[in-house]
Amino acid sequence: MDPTVVLLSAFLISIIALGIFIWSMRNGAFHDPSGAQVIFTAHEVGRAEDPAAASDSLTALQRTVDLSQGHATAPIDEELVPRAEADRSSATVTFVFLSCAIGWLLLGSFAGLISSVKLHDPDWLARYEWLTFGIIRTIHLNAVIYGWSSMAGLGLAMWMLPRLLKTTLQGGRFALLGAVLWNAGLIAGIGSVGAGFSTGLEWLEMPWQVALLLVLGGALIGIPLLLTVARRTVDHLYVSVWYLGAAVFWFPILYLVANLPGVHFGVEQATMNWWYGHNVLGYFFTPLSQAAIYYFVPKVIGRPLQSYALSLLGFWTQAFFYGMVGAHHLIGGPVPSWLTTLSIVQSVMMVVPVTAFATNHFLTMKGYWKTLVYSPTLRFMVVAGVMYVLVSLEGTVEALRSVNTVTHFTHFTVAHAHLGMYAFVAITLFGGIYFVMPRVVEREWPYPRLIAAHFWLVLVGIVVYVVALSIGGWLQGRAMLDATRPFLDSVAITLPWLKARSIGGALMTAGHVVFAVHFLAMVFDLGPRRDRAALFHVARSAEHA
Amino acid sequence: MRSETQLFAGALVMIAAATAALVALPYFQLHDLRPPTGLHPYTSAQLRGRQQYIREGCMYCHSQQPRDRSQAPDEVRGWGRASVPADYFYDTPHLLGTMRTGPDLFNIGARQPSLDWNLGHLYQPRAYVPGSIMPSFPYLFEVKTKAEAGDRVVAVPKEFAPRNGVVVAKPAALDLASYLLSLDHTYPVIATDVAGR
């Protein structure tokens, strides 16, 4: 194929997209500042909200917010009654999703830790086939991706929807059925991989017969979204709804096309593989996480997002550019060169949505940085937002041919993947769960110190992980490019960094155990009851009455 | 309803554009490829071995796609010329790989043509390559007190051999090794094969 034709059509598509964008602007989709206000009630702006904060922290948080924007009118309690109803309508569904997610997180963490140790201690547990690196690594990936990240992201989505649309969750039963199918598919899929029946395609290892259960489950989870949107009482779709709606719509299509049996072949299958592998990030996990950050950051500090228009610009540019970056995984490979060129160009263009996201959140948080001291949710969210910016910019640089020549085929890529899926996505999800669970079970987190322990364990853990593995990967790549050095040099040079990665991974796993124990204590009503009704504005007013 | 329409129509257009570029166009560009004359279809033992390769997850550490001389010294390392799409004519699923924790295997059959070496290396990589971090695969072998007729005995260096008995390759190990030996893409490619790269 003539590369000119491809680049020309990419150009034409961009021009058409620009036309649509201008049309939307003329129709006012970007101008109305009230778009950012829809997540608040009429008098709520200026009111801090973080159910995960202990009472003294919450008081301090509110004081900080007051100092930043002057005293706000306290919301009228009646205003918050519909919010309480919205929360109640989604409680069961959210609880089921989040519980499954945490189970998968534990399995995935230990599988990951075992894989990591095996890379510097290859004869450890070598007698068991299902524990060989190639299998346990795959169990790790599928458990944390399709188990933890998907279930937690969708669980938060189900919880946010009624709040974002100011109505109650409709058709929650479909989501529950979807969760059942999804988990059944995942158990069967991970079981298949463990028993040696992998398809061999990275990110798509589960056999297509069980993958169909995830397609179906994902589609069912989309039904409550449609039904709830149809019942909305707000004029504007808040930016989080755009992200959630698109993510839930995109996933079944991606996963179905990728799993079509008997269609893909040879090198075409490799391009499809990375079209899927990167788009499941860009079209599913990234938007799910961004939806959470766009909701929780403004909500916690009681301040509307700086620019609703900028958030939509970020959404559409991301949707366009991110979709075509996948082939940068095949730079230097036996694929048509126009394809890798296209992906490199779009990877560079990703700077546009990332800048939009970073600017918007920086300006929203400006003057409010001190709130980070008092709000556990916000700490997770802001760290995750920073990590998103870092990982995206790193991804752009990594896609450049000269850098890619070094980092491709090395542990550097693994570090990059964890910077994205963990430092950004998982940490967003942790923050969201801390906010959401007190509303779901109507009880506070029993041990606030465990939240801090979890935060620092996983943060230190992932920093050690990413820094060590990035250095190791870079050295590995440099050694491999030097033909005068034997290949084994590129192995030996990584060993200290692989060991450091295991330490980072162990800290993260310890953090997850703390998290899971705390979650169980909360659910089973163990530990001190600290139920200030302050959590539940409506309940408090009822007490005072 | 305008927002919803915009959202779903826009989302559909975006994913359609991405799929067209990264899946549909390569599909149409590559689906008429013919295999190079030097490339042979896999035998059934090699295909079983390929399945074993997938089962053990070899592709997570070994690529099968040497890069061009102008980009990296892959050819100098003995991994072979840059591969072209036609080289993968018989490869479904593809096993291009994304990591080189271990070396590229696109021409391992030409580089290590010894069945004995390959079997022993699968049994205990460190017996042959000191400092290797490749997993050993003891469960693909059997330790017998005495070899029986038809057994393929693996000659393992002394310090890595079991104290008593002999190491015998199970059929899965033999299949895997025969797949590895089949990885030989040293034949020349002609201009038409390169088309599409």
Image (cartoon, rainbow, N blue to C red):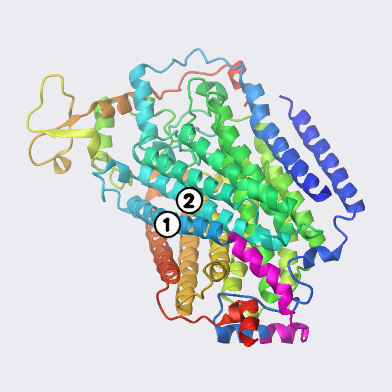
Q: Where is residue A486 in the image (x, y as percent from the top left)?
A: 39, 43
Q: In this view, does B90 lie above or below A362?
A: above
Circle 2: is it few (<14), some (14-19), or many (20+) Cα within 10 Å? Answer: many
**In the drawing, does residue B82 fall left or right of residue B108?**
right
The chain ID associated with circle 2 is A
Tag 2: amino acid: Gly
Residue at 68% of width from left, 27% of height from top? Answer: B25
Tag 1, which secondary structure? helix
Q: Where is residue A442 in the image (x, y as percent from the top left)?
A: 54, 72
**In the drawing, does residue A486 fall left or right of residue A392?**
left
Residue at 87% of width from left, 62% of height from top? Answer: A32
Q: Name the residue under label 2.
A: A147
| Image quarter in which the C terminus of chain A is found | bottom right
The chain ID associated with circle 1 is A
Q: Where is residue A93 in the image (x, y as percent from the top left)?
A: 55, 56
Q: In this view, does A262 lie above or below A230?
A: above
Same chain, marks 1 and 2?
yes
- Dominant secondary structure of the magenta stretch? helix
**In the drawing, does residue A220 fall left or right of residue B185?**
right
Q: Name the residue under label 1.
A: A103
Residue at 68% of width from left, 68% of height from top? Answer: A83
Report how far apart the C-alphas of labels 1 and 2 lie in the structure.
Answer: 8 Å
Q: Quadrant of residue A300?
A: bottom right
